[in-house]
Image: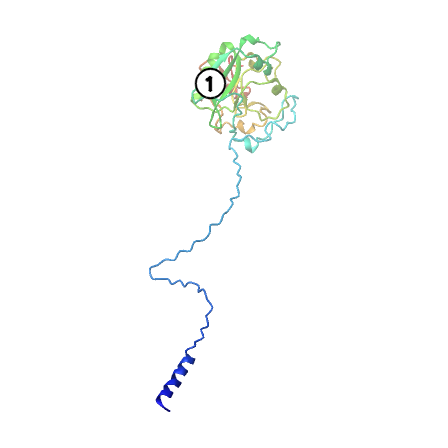
Amino acid sequence: MPLAALVAVLLAGCSESSAVTTTALPETTAAPTVVDMPGQTTTTTVAPTTTTAVPVTTTTISPFARPEWLGTIVLPLGPDGENGIAQPTPPELADRRLETIDRLPPPPDVQFVATIGPVPADVIARSTWTEECPVTRDELAYINISHYGFDGEFHTGEMIVNAAVAEDVVGVFEKLHAARFPIEQLKVTTQEELDAPPTGDGNGSGAYGCRPAVGSDGWSMHAYGLAIDINPFHNPYVNGELILPELAMSYLDRERVLPGMVFAGDVVVEAFSEIGWEWGGDWNSLKDWMHFSYNGR
């Protein structure tokens, strides 16, 4: 084949094979590959979870809280038809240290505070005084006085006393305040309280009460404002089988020494002795450990 013809054939073959068909590959998105490098820390952030706290309610009971039944259970009457039959002391009261119920604003601080004045009309109205009592209203005085409680707080108490001894009485309570001798309640006795059926668990300290002496038709020294009872439950009256308050049997054991009790030679007995008053704990025929009086009766 002539050389020119051969070249022409070769050129024609090259022209046909140069038509190249290109097929596009589908695009793919590859997941990135994470390669942990030496010395490199990978941190993963987790979305925070919200938790709703459920509130917890707790009830704190004061160690000085008064039993709910206090003053509500009437005792069977004894032979005299007036006082109840003595009963064993409930466990809650065997070492009685109850909170004071405030009837008056508490003192501003721990300093002793006392005021003496005529008995206001509203106080006379809620007291036991009447026209038939052995002293007139003008012979009495009203005292507001601070005292220490079993709950470790200072409180303001009140008393009606004979006006002639008011200053001396304040001096006694100033000494008890300084010694932090605990008094549960210091209050004016009402006629309703005197007339109420016996529950045997009262513990109100106080002075004036227009009533006869226990077991007698004659006036008590309380009716003259010349006697004061201190923590009756801790320092009961006992005459044979008659115990007042009736649930205070455990406090007949004077070998026990508990807060609020009165003993010979202690700050209470000495403070009253200094103003010439006598103590029922020294009596022979019976014992009235709560009782202090101007003339020993």
Pick the quarter of the image with the N terminus.
bottom left
Residue, far bottom: 1
Q: Nearer the viewer, residue 12 or 201?
A: 12
Quadrant of res 36: bottom left
| SS label for mark 1 | helix
Dot 1: few (<14), some (14–19), or many (≥20) neighbours within 10 Å?
many
Q: Amino acid at mark 1?
A: Phe
Quadrant of res 34: bottom left
Up the image or down, 32 lies above or below 219; here it is below
Residue 185 can be seen in this image: yes
Q: Pointer 1: what residue?
A: 173
Residue, far left: 39
Which percent across, then down, holds residue 174? 44, 18
Q: Nearer the viewer, residue 189 or 103?
A: 103
Q: Nearer the viewer, residue 135 or 147?
A: 147
Pick the quarter of the image with the C terminus.
top right
Which percent across, then down, holds residue 276? 47, 13
Query: How many numbered dots are placed on residues in this image?
Result: 1
Up the image or down, 246 lies above or below 28; here it is above
Q: Nearer the viewer, residue 205 or 190?
A: 190
Which percent across, then down, holds residue 137? 57, 9
Residue for point 53% across, 27% down:
251
Residue 169 can be seen in this image: no
Which percent across, then down, holds residue 32? 42, 63
Q: Report the colour scheme.
A: rainbow
Q: Is residue 118 left or right of residue 12?
A: right
